Each structure stands twice: as structure tokens, then as C-alpha cells.
Image (spheres, rainbow, N blue to C red):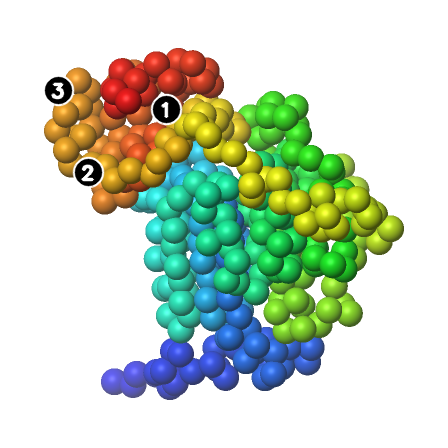
Amino acid sequence: MNTINLHNDADHTSSSNRYSRQLLFAPIGATGQAKLAAARVAIVGMGALGTVLSNHMARAGVGFLRLIDRDFVEQSNLQRQMLYDEADADASEPKAMAAAKRLQQANSAITLEPIVIDLNALNAESLLSDVDLILDGTDNFSVRFLINDVSAKHRIPWIYGGAVSSRGVSLTIIPGTTPCLRCMFGQSPAQGTAETCDTAGVIGPIIHTVASHQSTEALKLLVGAHEQLNRKMVHWDLWHNQHAAVDVSKARKADCPACALERYEYLEQDLGEDTIQTLCGRNSVQIQPLQAGSFHLEEWAAKWEPLGRIELNPFLLKFHINETLTLVLFPDGRILIQGTNDPSQAKSLYSRYIGM
Ligand SMILES: [Zn+2]
């Protein structure tokens, strides 16, 4: 009997074979590939954009990827969040962990650092200042303005991306060279004023369009092809066949608080009390206690067990209070109340069941 071994090269970390098509692409080549292997990238948000971004970066051979996300996988993610499957949703697997597992299967030669955390003013600098590039996979402006502050302060480029409905936008931001997010938008829009995913929905293809554009810009930056970067703010509407690139080269502001005056207001904002936040499109409220705690999930599971159905994995505890309300507790004390958009109801449930 004849057997045919199509994979004579058993060493799957052999980089010349793995990256052969990318090595043939002259602007990257062997020199660029070595730069990618040495590069460190942080991806903030491992939802729709983040899964596409991290997939491109991991497969391209970026040597270190930090995956930052506060959420766990749910059924409604599977339509567009391309690294997750039904088993991840059934297990309420944190997105950062599920993504790292999948990406490591795709490329065992790179280092992945999944972090299940809510990026905020207290932790943003330590999570984002030791990388070469920050990629935006978030869905909200408060986090983007934090990223922008870290970027300006530490002179780290970042690539803004956003998608809603069938529309998307992206901008490559290089501190000191291009306008930053504050030059462009001033300040973070108040919560509820920007169109969000709960009112408009989103289709999968626009995610890939935006994230693939961001990823291409990332590859250019990481291999040092700065002259090829797209200096325009790019917009798409895939459903209505529109594409525009807006010249923003004159948009740098001499009085920009972040990139000109070095005032990092989002980074330095006073988190004087617990933050309570209604989450975009999630029918959920997040409560982040000011002091990160250390919660033993098993103990809380035992405490709530008589009161409702419990689901527990190493990263989170779900307590189904009733048919509609679910409380999700993370080990650092962060809480999600699912089933409500009302911060005061969330706060009262928090006091009732956590009792602080
Ligand atoms: Zn600026």
C-alpha cells in the first residue's frame, strides 16, 4: 500500500515554509519577516474587529500578541467574531482565552498573552506602553481615548477602526506625525449619543473590510514601510457601494490636549468611585469596583447556589437570578448584570448580592 506524505517538512515552525507566500511579497521579504517576528502588538477588544486583527497578526508571524478583552463568548457573537464557535459560547469562555487557544493552534511559534480585564485609566498604561503598536478592536470611544492618551504619551502608533451597520472607518495614528483621535474628534462623545451596535446592528463583511485595512497598515508599520502608510481617514459603506478617503493631513491641532499639550486627561481621569457603565448593544451593565479585589468564585458559587442556577468556569461565575437577570462575577470583583440597561437597577442588584 502506498502512502503519500504531502508534508515532508514535519517541522511546522519552519518559517521559510510557513511564510513562503509572504516572503515572496517583496515589500516584506526576509527582512520584513524578521521584523514581524521581533514585533510586539497589543490588541484591545477581541470582539469582531479583534478576532480578524489577531488572526492576521498571528498568521503573519508577529512574535508577540497581547489580547485584551473583558467579555466572554455568547451565541450572538458567532455571526461575525470569526475565532469562536458554539462550544466557546456554551462554556462562556472568555474571548481572550478562546482566541489565544485558537491562534496558538494556527501558529505555535508566536507568544500569545491573553488578558481578561476591562481596560481603564488605572491599567491602560501598564498594558499598552511596552508594545510597538496598538490595534483598536473596541466598540467604544471611552477606551479609544484612553488608547490615544497612551499612544501620545509613549509615542506608540495605533490604528483606529470602527464598524456599525454596513459602514466602517479606519485611521492610522502616529504620534507627532499624524493627527491623533483628539485632533480629529475633540473629546469622547457622551454615552448614548453615538450610534451604537444595539440600534443599527452590523454585518460581518464590514468587520473584515475594516480589520483587514487596519492589519495591512499594521504590517506596513511593523516592517518599517512608513512611506506606504495610508495618511487618510478611510470610510466604507459596503451595502451602499460607497468608499471615501478623506485627507486629514492638515487636521493636527496646535492646541490638542493629548498630542500637543501633553495633557492626558483620559489617562489621568479621577476614578474616585466604582464605575458603572451600560454596555453597547448588550442589555448589560458593568460595575467595576474602584479597588480590584480577589474573589474566590467557588465561595460565591456556594453562597448563591440556593438562590438560582449557577455556572462556573475558571474565569467567571454566572448566577441566574431569574428568567431575565444574570449576574456575572469575575475574580477581580468586576460584575456584569445582564438583562438590564438600567444602572440603578444594576447597582441595587449589586448591593443585594455582593453586599458592598
Ligand atoms: Zn492630537
Q: Which of marks 2 and 1 is nearer the N terminus?
A: 2
Looking at the rendered image, the quarter that the N terminus falls into is bottom left
Q: Which of 104 and 306 is in front in this view?
A: 306
Q: Where is residue 239 in the image (x, y as percent from the top left)?
A: 71, 38
The answer to whether one can see residue 332 in this image is yes
* Badge 3 amino acid: Pro
Residue 306 numbered tag: 3
* Badge 2 amino acid: His
Looking at the rendered image, the quarter that the C terminus falls into is top left
Q: Position of residue 52 (x, y in %)?
A: 53, 53
Which residue: 67% across, 68% down?
Answer: 220
Q: Disc 1 designates what residue?
A: 337
Contact check, label 3 and label 1, Cβ < 8 Å? no
Residue 296 numbered tag: 2
Residue 114, picture quadrant? bottom left
* Badge 1 amino acid: Ile
Q: Position of residue 66 (x, y in %)?
A: 45, 58
- Is residue 297 rendered to the left or right of residue 166? left
Q: Which of marks 3 and 2 is nearer the N terminus?
A: 2
Disc 2 crowd rating (10 Å Cα; few below 14, some 14-19, many 20+) is: some
Q: Nearer the viewer, residue 306 or 99?
A: 306
Contact check, label 3 and label 2, Cβ < 8 Å? no
State which mark lies toward you, 2 or 1: 2
